[in-house]
Image (cartoon, grey):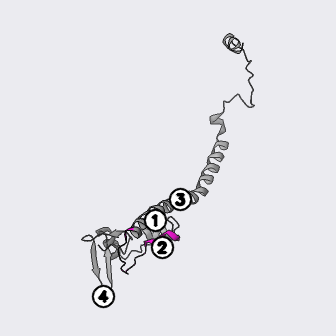
Amino acid sequence: MRLVKCWFCSSTIYPGHGIQFVRNDAKIFRFCRSKCHKNFKMKRNPRKVKWTKAFRAAHGKDMTKDKTFEFEKKRNRPERYDRNVTENTLKAIKKIDKIRSTREAKHIENRLKPNKQKKFNEDKKELNNQIDLVRAPGVSEKVKVVVPKIKSVQNEAMEE
């Protein structure tokens, strides 16, 4: 089963799906759906359309350089079936998926970190500007309340 990538959005196209466009110079363009085909006909640049993988890669939204992507590359050389090799390969695939998901999560966390600090500073500034809405009008200084500690009869009985 041959899986190809959409020329516009880079999503996977399964057999029997999508549209194929052949230009006069025999260049083949494959599209996963009519949305991608129409955008191509309108001469839109995939790097400027926000929902494409090309945009996400160009603007640092997704990981683009990682060693785990090398395992996904297509290999055309046939190999003799060996049960042990297949078993080890399946184990490796699971490990690689786990590593990739943790790295993607870390990438997203690092990408969002500056925005969290910026939002915190904006909220702090807004609170300082409009503190009179939060604080009661007559109170200007902090008052410390002292609560006396009273021993109950039950605690004394338990201690003895």
Q: Nearer the viewer, mark 3 or mark 1?
A: 1
Amino acid type assigned to the residue bearing label 2 in the image: Glu
Amino acid type assigned to the residue bearing label 3 in the image: Ile
Which of the two residues, 128 or 158, is positioned nearer the viewer here? 158
Q: Could you tell me if the residues under marks 4 and 1 are in contact, i.e. CB atoms within 8 Å?
A: no
Inter-mark Cα distance, 4 to 1: 39 Å
List the residue tagged with mark 1: 92
Inter-mark Cα distance, 3 to 2: 21 Å
Amino acid type assigned to the residue bearing label 4 in the image: Ala
Around disc 4, counting alpha carbons within 10 Å, would you say few (fewer than 14), some (14 to 19), or many (20 or more)? few
Q: Earlier in the sequence, mark 2 or mark 1?
A: 2
**Secondary structure of the residue carrying numbered label 1:** helix
Q: Earlier in the sequence, mark 3 or mark 2?
A: 2
| Residue 48 shows in this picture | no
Inter-mark Cα distance, 2 to 1: 13 Å
Amino acid type assigned to the residue bearing label 1 in the image: Ala
List the residue tagged with mark 3: 108
Q: Could you tell me if the residues under marks 2 and 4 are in contact, i.e. CB atoms within 8 Å?
A: no
Q: Could you tell me if the residues under marks 3 and 1 are in contact, i.e. CB atoms within 8 Å?
A: no
**Left or right: 31 with respect to 159?**
left
